[in-house]
Amino acid sequence: MTTATVSPNTAVRPQAAGAALFSERLAVAGRPLSAVTGAEIQAPLIQGGHARYANLDYGASTPALSVVSAYLNEILPFYASVHRGAGYASQISTSVYENARNIVRDFVGGRASDSVIFTRNTTDSLNLLAGCLPSANGRPAGDVLYLDIEHHANLLPWQGVPHRSVVAADTLSGTIEALRAELEQGGVSLLAVTGASNVTGEILPVRALAALAHEHGARIVVDAAQLAPHRRINIGADDVDYLAFSGHKLYAPFGAGVLVGRADWLDAGTPHLAGGGAVREARLDGVSWATGPARHEGGSPNVLGAATLARATQVIAALDQERWHAHESAIRSFLVEGLQKIDGVTVHQIFKDTDPDTDTIGVVNFSVEGYDAGLVAAYLSAEHGVGLRDGRFCAHPLLKRLGLPSGSLRASFGLGSRLEDAQRLLAGIEELRRTGLGWDYVVDSGRWVPANDTRIYPDWAPNTPGTAGAAPCVDD
Ligand SMILES: Cc1ncc(COP(=O)(O)O)c(C=O)c1O
């Protein structure tokens, strides 16, 4: 075994020709754009010592913004059951929870008449909408149409209702034409589309797709789980009917999700969670359901999840858009260019006509010749303290079509990221190509892990060794 030295100073050094570009990028992305909780945590390394954890897994869950963590501490003493309590803390909690709806509505440019429903996450939001599709004469009023590039959250809920899918073309323009051709066949009630691919970070033109859907008498739902943390969204201006996203990908802890959109379908749809709070009146053998968000929010809601989600949206809404974009785009272009320079590394994208400057978010997908993606992820974690995702990213149809049936790697970043995180990843991959692995790795329960892992983890996180690099949606 060799000893790897991991330090920011050993990271990829800019070539002379690229030095000016590098320092330009360092000026915009040398430091996090916003403070996040846990930015300085130290990851134990397999060969001994520690390195600052380079979190390149924002696409899965973001760290909490420090402002949001402070807000959580402020409201936690008042945390109580909402809606039905007459007590002081309960009234405050109710106010915070209900006000969170207005904050989120403003954040996405929602119409005054839109419902804002808090859910468990994006997956839950889209399942909820699937239960609210309109019917005519007791039969579904149309099909749901979706692309093959979707995350399973925007694929599987529609498989339980009448649906059609379209295979995306190798260009975005071709894909829009393919959707148009399908819509022209008629009979589509809802176009379900992602705002940005969780696999490659490529953005889809939401406004144009909304217009296309409406031209053909359909509505549109945008899965904004990846888009919302990276771009301003205005569903009013873009004429988007429904929008779903998750707090845990938007710098808020506790994982609340939200569905915002036109109230008519939602008020007529099947209550998502039958139970307390969702009814006007319940009888022993019947019920009269509430309308509005209550209809779908049966049971005690995730008050702190909704509150922190709303607080995070306020911080994001206040960001200077240019600086925000410049920060993420500097890291992305540095990473993509760096990866492309390493022999044996391939960067993947869906569309040939994606403009990397304007049409991508902080997600980069790649693979390293000769190595399983899971092995590379385990190596980066164990030997470099870099966290990123491997696998099929809950987008099996797309990975298969991209010729990556056994998965690839995804680096994702955002407000708390800095250029050095990307440098650390590049240094790790360069070293892998140059000298190979510095430790032995074994497959344990289907996942690559370092052999003889003696790293020490907090005692409140038992059994951590062996799960490093574990990713869902690999085998399932
Ligand atoms: C594009 C996209 N949609 C939906 C989801 C599901 O989000 P959640 O796990 O919060 O339900 C994800 C999660 O990675 C995603 O990236």
Image (cartoon, helix red, strand yellow):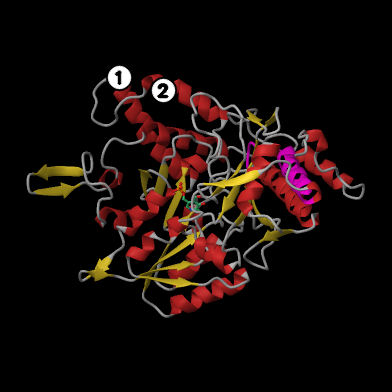
Residue 195 at x, y percent in the picture: 53, 57
Magenta segment main secondary structure: helix
Residue 444 at x, y percent in the picture: 54, 45
> Is residue 422 a member of the stretch shown in magenta?
yes
x 51%, y 36%: residue: 312
Which residue in the protein does label 2 denote?
Answer: 76
The three-letter amino acid code for the residue at tag 2 is Leu
The three-letter amino acid code for the residue at tag 1 is Tyr
In this image, 388 relative to 261: left or right? right
Q: Nearer the viewer, residue 215 or 297?
A: 297
Whether 139 is drawn above or below 384: the answer is below
Q: Earlier in the sequence, mark 1 or mark 2?
A: 2
Query: For the magenta stretch, what is the residue range?
Result: 412-433
- SS type, badge 1: helix
x 53%, y 54%: residue: 393
Instruction: Report crowding for label 1: few under 14, some 14 to 19, many 20 or more residues within 10 A (C-alpha).
Output: few
Which residue in the protein does label 1 denote?
Answer: 88
Q: Viewer-nearest of labels 1 and 2?
A: 2
The quarter of the image holding the N terminus is top right
